Image (cartoon, rainbow, N blue to C red):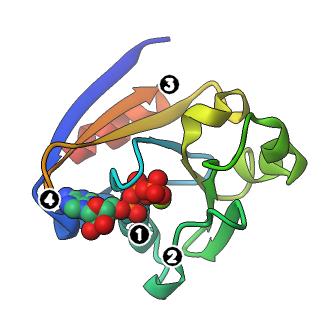
Amino acid sequence: MKENKLTFKSAGVDETTRFGAKLGMLLSQGDVIALIGELGAGKTTLVKGIVRGLGVTDRRVVKSPTFSLVHKYKGRIPVYHFDAYRLEDGEEMLDIGSDEMIYGDGVALVEWADKVSGCLPEEYLKITLRAVSENERSIEICGYGKRYDKIMGNLI
Ligand SMILES: Nc1ncnc2c1ncn2[C@@H]1O[C@H](COP(=O)(O)OP(=O)(O)OP(=O)(O)O)[C@@H](O)[C@H]1O
Ligand SMILES: [Mg+2]
């Protein structure tokens, strides 16, 4: 599949959140965001922004769902926030009904998506975060599938 790649730099938490909000505003039903990066890379921080951009007003609800695996937020469309950190593979993810959420009525955001790559659809947006220094992060965006071309075009 044709892939489309962009890299951004963030100088701090606020910039990552703002970038997420901009992305969140561009998302629509069926979009799937795979978030990849080490512990503390900024995946949940980015999710906070994305969720804001999707119209979820209560930002306090967004925390890492490490212990519950998935959180659902009410935005302009439903938002499903997964954290696969504790999973060995995609089986447990499928057991909780991830298919219905990923191929469903809203947007799916999946932290540690590399652990459950088998649960992802063929087309998704891959975001890889890397710590460059204490406060700097690189945010690499890779779109798999045509539906993400327009979103990426609007991010530049
Ligand atoms: N530019 C930045 N963008 C995002 N987070 C930053 C940035 N600079 C510093 N940080 C810090 O990095 C940490 C990111 O934590 P966050 O929970 O978002 O990471 P995570 O990738 O979700 O980690 P985990 O895998 O543990 O869930 C926070 O402590 C945050 O304050
Ligand atoms: Mg996290």
Residue 92: quadrant of the picture: top right
Is there a contact, CB below 8 Å, between mark 1 and mark 2? yes
Q: x, y (%) of residue 67?
A: 68, 66
Distance from disc 4 to disc 1, alpha carbons, whole Å, reads 17 Å
User: Under 8 Å from ligand 1: the CB of mark 3?
Assistant: no
Mark 4 closeness class: few <14, some 14–19, many ≥20 residues within 10 Å: few
The disc placed on residue 48 is: 1
In front: mark 4 or mark 1? 4
Q: x, y (%) of residue 114?
A: 56, 32
In this view, 39 is above or below 77: above
SS for callout 3: loop
* Residue to which mark 2 is pinned: 62
- Tag 2: residue type? Val
In this view, 146 is above or below 51: above
Of residues 26 and 74, the one drawn nearer to the viewer in this rendering? 74
- Tag 4: residue type? Asn
- Tag 3: residue type? Gly
SS for callout 1: helix
